């Protein structure tokens, strides 16, 4: 009886011992769960951070690819335009050199083909605003191309200076319109490259 009385006073009854043991186990379990939960949150946090870093790298790479495509397209447009101006200057001389006119015309054909090939790459890269700007340039380039070769053919056929001057002026007008369209494409390219990646991802692509 003496032990039972003291045991009850100290909380050392069989039930008390079980309760204390359960509390200790429960506390340990909570500690394990807390540690596991923290580890899990850390894991998912690191995974999310890794995915974000990867996506950022991909976005930067895509932006670089597009920038290079746009720059190459504009460079080829300028190369075609310079070749066309050289050719029209040869046509506009008082006494055109037919060999020079022919060489200039051949160079224009080459630069034209290079430009149209690059346009296909632009359409693959997009987005829609860039493709629309490129497509708007095409009919103006075609008009300039036709005007140029009408003038070249006139020079080859020994057309008079008055006729050649009229054709030169027609080409210059077409070339000015083409240059304005190229400037619009350049502005569209800058707008696209300045867009945040999240906005770029939502832009429609060419169907």
Image: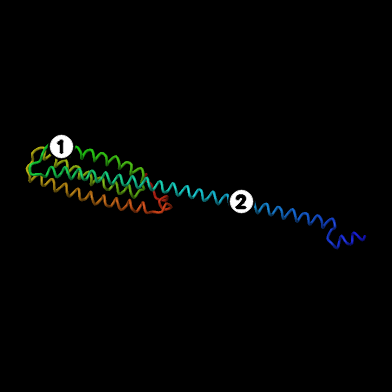
Using the numbered discs, state the Cα–Cα distance from disc 1 to disc 2 in whole angstroms.
76 Å
Tag 1 residue = 102
Which one is nearer the viewer's eye here, 100 or 127? 100
Q: Across the whole image, how many numbered discs are drawn on residues?
A: 2
Q: Nearer the viewer, mark 1 or mark 2?
A: 2
Which one is nearer the viewer's eye here, 52 or 179? 52
Left or right placement of residue 153 versus residue 199 in this view: left
> Residue farthest to the right?
1
The tag on residue 39 is: 2
Left or right placement of residue 140 versus residue 206 in this view: left
Asked if 111 appears above or below 192 in the picture, the reply is: above
Question: Could you tell me which quadrant the C terminus lies in?
Answer: top left
Which one is nearer the viewer's eye here, 177 or 6? 6
Q: Categorize mark 2 by other alpha carbons within 10 Å: few (<14), some (14-19), many (20+).
A: few
Q: Position of residue 57 (x, y in %)?
A: 44, 47
Q: Position of residue 174 (x, y in %)?
A: 19, 48
Left or right placement of residue 8 versus residue 72 in this view: right
* Lower sequence index among marks 1 and 2: 2
């Amino acid at each position: 009886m003496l032990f039972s009385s003291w045991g009850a006073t100290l909380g050392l009854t069989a039930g008390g011992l079980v309760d204390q043991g359960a509390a200790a186990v429960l506390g340990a379990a909570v500690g394990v769960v807390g540690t596991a939960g923290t580890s899990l949150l850390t894991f998912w946090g690191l995974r999310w951070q890794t995915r974000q870093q990867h996506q950022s790298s991909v976005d930067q790479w895509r932006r670089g690819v597009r920038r290079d495509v746009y720059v190459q397209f504009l460079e080829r447009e300028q190369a075609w335009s310079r070749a066309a101006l050289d050719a029209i200057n040869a046509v506009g001389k008082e006494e055109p050199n037919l060999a020079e006119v022919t060489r200039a015309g051949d160079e224009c054909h080459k630069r034209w083909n290079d430009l149209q090939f690059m346009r296909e790459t632009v359409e693959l890269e997009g987005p829609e605003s860039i493709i629309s700007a490129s497509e708007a340039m095409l009919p103006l380039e075609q008009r300039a191309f036709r005007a140029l070769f009408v003038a070249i053919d006139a020079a080859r056929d020994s057309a008079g200076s008055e006729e050649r001057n009229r054709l030169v002026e027609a080409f210059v007008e077409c070339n000015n319109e083409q240059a304005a369209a190229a400037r619009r494409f350049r502005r569209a390219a800058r707008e696209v490259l300045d867009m945040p990646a999240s906005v770029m991802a939502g832009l429609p692509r060419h169907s």
